[in-house]
Image: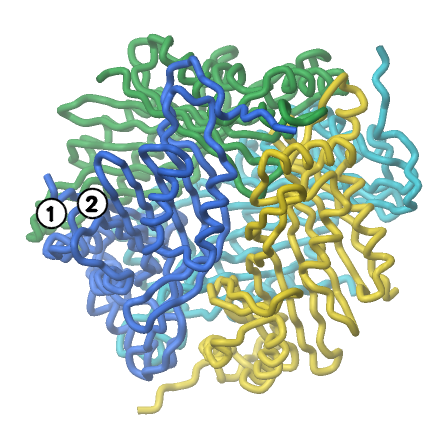
Chain colours: A blue, B green, C cyan, D yellow
Amino acid sequence: MKLKDVQSLEDNRNIDIDKVGVKDLTYPIILKDRSKGEQGTVANIAMSVHLPKEFKGTHMSRFIEILNRHKDNVSIVSCSDILDEMHTVLNSDTTHIELSFPYFINKIAPVSKQSALMDYNCDFVAISDKVKGKDFILTVHVPVTSLCPCSKEISEFSAHNQRSIASISIRYHKKIVWIEDIIEIAESSASAPVYSLLKREDEKFVTEQAYNNPVFVEDIVRNITQKLMNDDRVSWFSVECVNMESIHNHSAYANITIDKRV
Amino acid sequence: MKLKDVQSLEDNRNIDIDKVGVKDLTYPIILKDRSKGEQGTVANIAMSVHLPKEFKGTHMSRFIEILNRHKDNVSIVSCSDILDEMHTVLNSDTTHIELSFPYFINKIAPVSKQSALMDYNCDFVAISDKVKGKDFILTVHVPVTSLCPCSKEISEFSAHNQRSIASISIRYHKKIVWIEDIIEIAESSASAPVYSLLKREDEKFVTEQAYNNPVFVEDIVRNITQKLMNDDRVSWFSVECVNMESIHNHSAYANITIDKRV
Amino acid sequence: MKLKDVQSLEDNRNIDIDKVGVKDLTYPIILKDRSKGEQGTVANIAMSVHLPKEFKGTHMSRFIEILNRHKDNVSIVSCSDILDEMHTVLNSDTTHIELSFPYFINKIAPVSKQSALMDYNCDFVAISDKVKGKDFILTVHVPVTSLCPCSKEISEFSAHNQRSIASISIRYHKKIVWIEDIIEIAESSASAPVYSLLKREDEKFVTEQAYNNPVFVEDIVRNITQKLMNDDRVSWFSVECVNMESIHNHSAYANITIDKRV
Amino acid sequence: MKLKDVQSLEDNRNIDIDKVGVKDLTYPIILKDRSKGEQGTVANIAMSVHLPKEFKGTHMSRFIEILNRHKDNVSIVSCSDILDEMHTVLNSDTTHIELSFPYFINKIAPVSKQSALMDYNCDFVAISDKVKGKDFILTVHVPVTSLCPCSKEISEFSAHNQRSIASISIRYHKKIVWIEDIIEIAESSASAPVYSLLKREDEKFVTEQAYNNPVFVEDIVRNITQKLMNDDRVSWFSVECVNMESIHNHSAYANITIDKRV
């Protein structure tokens, strides 16, 4: 028995759909890192295509088939091939894939030099347009310490400090920008880095380091902006920082977006 | 003793900040509804301003002071006044406020005519720019039932169906568009509305109604688009629908954005 | 036409169901507060009953009908009536209702004496058993500041500090314990309270206050435990504190549960 | 310079702490599966110990050191060794570790026999008490399809159906119970399994399968209970099912907990 292909029926509403596809797929992926080769992690994935007005629907199962054909090799690098395959298999001129995943770094404590894995949440968005070409945006959410310059200035001793999340999104061209590169930019723009393992001598070090480098949420996004403006690999960026204030029940935040191409 | 105003210090990095402010404030608000007057609800609030390159920081506490001055009257309507006050008090040319909140409607079951409150999540974004004027975007997330046309066509009986969330964002001008109006547009574009209270005769009704109105996620966004294209109050819109597929562990989604002003 | 009542059919698997009902209902509620009377807020609600082995199913729509009959008066106080009505309408010997909601307090800054609303997340669980009687558990999640005693001791200056959430659950009998009472117990057990509005003189005050009162996560739960042990209104309690460490990307936590009735 | 060990100071409040430790650690782990060997995934981890009243604090960094010593071998199996190491290194009589992670299965579509990876969220709690011995609880959250028997009975055609999450927690002794075993128990207790990849012939199959096997949320927990009562490997279990109702904006749920040891 041949089952009718309802999705391929003609549609007469004359309306293009910008994006149609699947989302909230959980899937293991492989990532290349700057130092030592490969790491496995787990991603939340969305895949979609542009649907021209002529067609009633896309074929949702094909997204999963494509993903499964790349089963042992879903990665930032293979996203480009996945996008190409989506053009063909789903018969569309514009294809999208989005991955969100934790990335692990073996982080070394500043004094004891003990090391431990630490996670950084990342997003990778890849778009392929048959006319405009490919476009990639990498976002890394970097936890850092921020210590308040106002609190330090006005208080006789100490200063309120807290965990902040500095989120850096970049478009790069010609040369690759590693996740590790972005983490370093964020950490050097805050009061101190954040670690998963700190012994007492390390805790003393980062406490004093933070007090010696007070920054507002405004300073963090400006410091990051200065570095990205001077980085020739980066053609566009958007920086956001959220301070989970230790003296409030709400957060402070700041955002700067700059397109160096215009 | 006069405490130093660190935020007002000059900054020499020469970098404007697009948005700086507070977020994740939880706050009671009052909303006007189409039918009967007012309802109280609770919002998650973000407020921010543009910070010119000359200043080291904004004054975060002033956001809270402004909000508290409008304590018994934070609403979609008063947002315009709040934005104006932010211009003055925070000395900025561009001001933003964002509210997310549940909105309640007394919904009547289709056959038994019994009524019960049902909640709809909404977002309201308001921006005031001294040069460009004010801009408002209202988003309503409407839960609906979707029943799959393909599953109905190919199966001897029944069809898979599920809860979907149709999210409609609009910019309106001249005439107000009520949250209730947007809910009606979404519900009439899906297989059936969703209710909080259904007696047996109602359950029979909506089960059959959904089977008689099968829609893909693509159909929902296209049906909504048709209605918004013909609504003169709406100058721009973005429609997204997410189907929490009953046969999969992931969701299907579709998106259409149209700016009628260009 | 009479529609068949499938739920009332007999079941032959011989298995009682501990709890069956509805959850994730969003609903406006009214709360009495210690100082000034009433406040409106929005709750996430779950309602359930014990289902004896004889019956195939409960009647889900009746939960919503009961809730709607109490429409303008869903509150901690009316929960007792709602439980009684569930016994009758759903024909069950054990009935449950759970509410989670933000509660607002007009909080006064320590030096400037400026006031602003601040939210505290609360949970209220009420159970009625025809044999054992009624049981109520009130939980309040109180954000506070914690400043690390180790970091203070070993560092030449400053100390890492962060927002912590101290969650106190209590069973009380005879006399009412207000949400405000629990907040005070939590705040006086930490390094400093958290506020929604702090002017510069207040920021100086809480910065110094926290440095003068360093506490580990262990100290917070022990300090709270001491107070609850000495509070005759409280017959059982469970205390948890989570520190969102400013120097780590993970949290520290501690928990103590004590039943004074045994 | 020797830095003072504040945590080891004596405490005079005379209060034991039930659990103190770290939580919300994200960490890569390795899992053994029933069929083919090993899979890598990412876990959210909490580790804690009982702290006797004599000590002011535990040593948080040691939890991370233990985890990192097991770096390439954090797994359900190695949890037992980790608990033992925690007894020694943290000098405590009761130690806990909790892991939450997605687990992947290569799932085969019922008619086309095409296969694709599907994820199942799992929790593993392990406790070691020097007196009582070790205790393990494995929870698997299995997405399934539920089709409403009432809606089927009263409607002329079709029936509302939706994604449900059946969560099964078990204590096992003597013989291992695989995650795959629990998934099979849940899927065979619902209207139909859920898949990540279904071609048209499969979609027809599961649509008709669900209509032929209508179940209330009560039926799902009772069907699972029947199977677990007859499984000699299982000594205790708790079953919960949540139906994300396609005709409502809230969920239906049911729960049964049975301790076969009493």
Q: Residue at x 74, y 61 (%)?
A: D170
Q: Amino acid at mark 1?
A: Ile
Q: Position of residue C124 (x, y in %)?
A: 64, 44
- Check the image and report above or below for C70 versus A159: above
- The chain under label 2 reads A
- The chain under label 1 reads B
- Check the image and report above or below for A157 versus D11: above
- Check the image and report above or below for B106 versus B21: above
Q: Secondary structure at mark 1?
A: loop
Q: Secondary structure at mark 2?
A: strand
Residue tagged by mark 1? B15
- Is residue A245 something that shows in the picture? no
Q: Amino acid at mark 2?
A: Ile
In the rendered structure, the answer to whether residue A137 lies left or right of residue D227 reads: left
Residue B90 sits in quarter? top left
Residue tagged by mark 2? A256
Q: Position of residue C237 (x, y in %)?
A: 66, 59
**C-beta proximity under 8 Å, tags 1 and 2:** yes
Out of D48 and B259, give the one closest to the viewer.
B259
Q: Position of residue A220 (x, y in %)?
A: 22, 55
- Is residue B164 something that shows in the picture? yes
In the rendered structure, find residue B234 and report the number of the disc placed on it.
none
